[in-house]
Amino acid sequence: MSKRSGRRGAAPGLPSKADIRKFIEESPGRVGRREIARAFNISGAERPALKKLLVEMREAGELGPRPARRERAEEKGGLPSVTVLEITGHDIDGELLAVPLRWRRRVAPPQIIVAAEAQQSGQPVGVGERVLARLTPADDGYLATVMRRLTVPGVRKILGVYQRVGRDGRVQPVEKGRQEVAITHEDAQGARSGELVLVTLESSGRASGPRRGKVVEKLGSVADARAVSLIAIYEHGIPVEFSEAALEAAESARQPALGDRTDLRDVPFVTIDPADARDHDDAVWAEADQDPDNPGGWVVFVAIADVAHFVKPGTVLDRDALKRGNSTYFPDRVVPMLPDALSGGLCSLHEGEDRACMAVRMVFDAAGNKLRHKFIRSLINSRASLTYEQVQAAEDGTPDTMTAPLYETVIAPLFGAYRALAKARDARHPLALEVPERRIRLDAEGHVASIAVAERLAAHQLIEEFMIAANVCAAEELERHHIPCMYRVHEEPALEKLESLREFLKSMGYELARGQLLTPEIFNRILAKAKDTEHVHVLHQVILRAQSQAHYSPENQGHFGLALPRYAHFTSPIRRYADILVHRGLIRACRFGDDGLPAAQDIAALKEIGEEISGYERRSMAAERDSADRYLAAYLSDRVGAEFEGVISGVTRFGLFVSLDETGADGLVPIASLGDDFYDHDEALHALVGRRTGKFYHLGDAVTVRLLEAVPVTGGLRLELVSVERSARPRHARKSARGKPPVRRGKPKAKQPPHKTRKKTRKR
């Protein structure tokens, strides 16, 4: 967004009309002259001209209603259009009141009313329940429309820590801000202090005092590392139990006969997965194209488990899968989207077993450009279940007993085809961000045994490129047949994020020019320039944070990060509901059977489902992140007082987040501990700037910190700054953040005259 463009339609020094319209469209709250002036740095002398410009635009009808934007609202401090709520009570008119389930900000949440007419027919909800709801901004908050009930009244289970109080006890829920639950001696079921328990609440509340409950399950000591993922599961409301009907349906399912399917059991498919994978939903095979008109070309097969055959629209398995949206992965367990009889059984492409698949045959030229593709509903029989490490070792010249016989006929052609596809990928210039992924490995007792950066192998990239190609084919096929598609959408960065990123990059000596067509290649060029500099990792982080969040939608808006005009998820239907929808669309498009996408499931219905499963995906990501934080806190809890090397990974109004080099754990250095100065938060430069001393704490600074506290139950780490090895001071560092009011600050020396304070030697 140009702050002072002076282009056509605006007086000199003012933003253009197009910039104003875009700012209004992408702002979640009400936008007036004050907000526009602040956004474009309009000074007092120029404000009358801005007012005149806005009046002209309003009279010309150029200030129309702005579209709702989920991600923008969330970024600006509002709420996403679809979120999980907890019903907390009634207002004076008898309407239900709700709060966001995951509200962790320091201010009170906005008022949310669940009006009676906004609830789905036949789905009344009550106090204490959790619901997935669509939010519509109202004058004094939000109006919530219930999309799906997530809990059943009277049987909600709460996870908490039991503490004995006299003869009876209390349970403190692991969810922050939740009221204690009173437990009688008879209802404690022998629970001991410090034990993690599940309790059910009484169906009716008491007039005063804590609610009463009953322990229904004891899950072991809260200090036990295996309790970590349980806390995340229940705190985020991830469903862990399947209905009896769904379990029965999964157990009674049978592998289909060949019938009208294409028999691909003679093709030597292999699966390539992590060593600890329990399910295998994709198998691959490649060979050199024998067509003389395609010299150096390749034929690639990607076969995906035919989950849609087992999970048909409207069935109990379908309903249970949609409640989850996706599988959720923790270091010690998986919460699957489908019952194990399917996810680990009939839908998993196990070695040596016939399996129903949806396969795609793709033909590429020598430069990796796709020439054509064809979808095939088939039966396959995988020759081997291989790991990434096995396949990479074979390619590097050290095959084992399993990969040696397969190398010439299977593994070598796979890498040959990958090298061709890699050429097309490089020509496309997808976003080349490198963010290290740390893997937490547990020992037999559930404690953290090691934390290491996951190695990125060519074998990983091989599978990734094949899956991307298959996903593109799925989107193209559905478009060609005019069948609704659940796209994986990744929009380009928001205008306000780009402006903040542009200012930060300028402070580091890099230029992100305005006015050019934004592509991933532009970011890649900046990263390439910074490749051998000390701040390359910081640039990867800030560019990543500037990106929009990917989501699911039947409205195609392209995939910015992959530099693709259309993209859908097709390759993981065992663990993603979106992929099942794409499979159903392909069945309908290619006339593979009567179990495809129902004709009644139009764009409007898919839009609602897309919002739901995008929300569930964010829920799983948050639970996985919280679980990792708790494991890391437990791992570090016996090292309180130790010093660690790290880097400032986040700068906020209340302190500095530091990522520790050794583990990747993030901890907070509170702003009050930074010393005897007042600090302004410069959002654009990602820095805290001391008003008096000029001390400058900047994103990317290398630091040494001391661990003061590690709390495994919450995953929190509190740190103390020991020393700073500063990166280059930004060129445009300022002592205040655009004249904003002071933020929370370090404590000044008490009762010391200002002139004396100014004369003191600056602390290092």
Image (cartoon, rainbow, N blue to C red):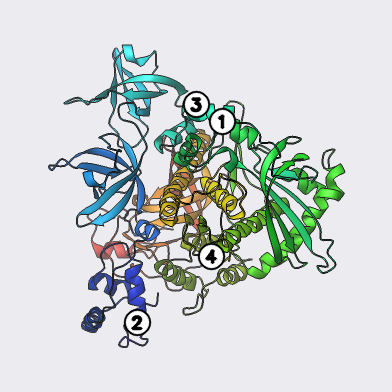
Give whichever of 651, 558 is nearer the camera.
Answer: 558
Give whichever of 541, 280 is nearer the camera.
Answer: 280
Tell me the amino acid under the disc marked 4.
Phe
> Residue at image x 58%, y 27%?
252
Task: Looking at the image, tell me whether mark 3 or mark 4 is earlier in sequence order.
Answer: 3
Inter-mark Cα distance, 3 to 2: 59 Å
Callout 2: helix, strand or loop?
A: loop
Callout 4: helix, strand or loop?
A: loop
**In this rendering, is residue 733 above or below 314?**
below
566 on left or right of 369: left
Task: Looking at the image, tell me whether mark 1 or mark 2 is earlier in sequence order.
Answer: 2
Tell me the amino acid under the disc marked 2.
Ser
Of marks 1 and 3, the one in the foreground: 1
Tell me the amino acid under the disc marked 1.
Ala
Callout 1: helix, strand or loop?
A: helix
**Quarter of the image containing the N terminus?**
bottom left
**Label 2: how many residues lie within 10 Å, few (<14), some (14-19) or many (20+)?**
many
**Label 4: how many residues lie within 10 Å, few (<14), some (14-19) or many (20+)?**
many
Residue 560 numbered mark, or none:
4
Q: Which residue is mark 3?
A: 224
Of marks 1 and 2, the one in the foreground: 1
Residue 250 numbered mark, or none:
1
Q: Which residue is mark 2?
A: 16
Q: Position of residue 363 (x, y in %)?
A: 74, 61
532 on left or right of 367: left
266 on left or right of 77: right
- In the rendered image, which quarter is residue 22 located in? bottom left
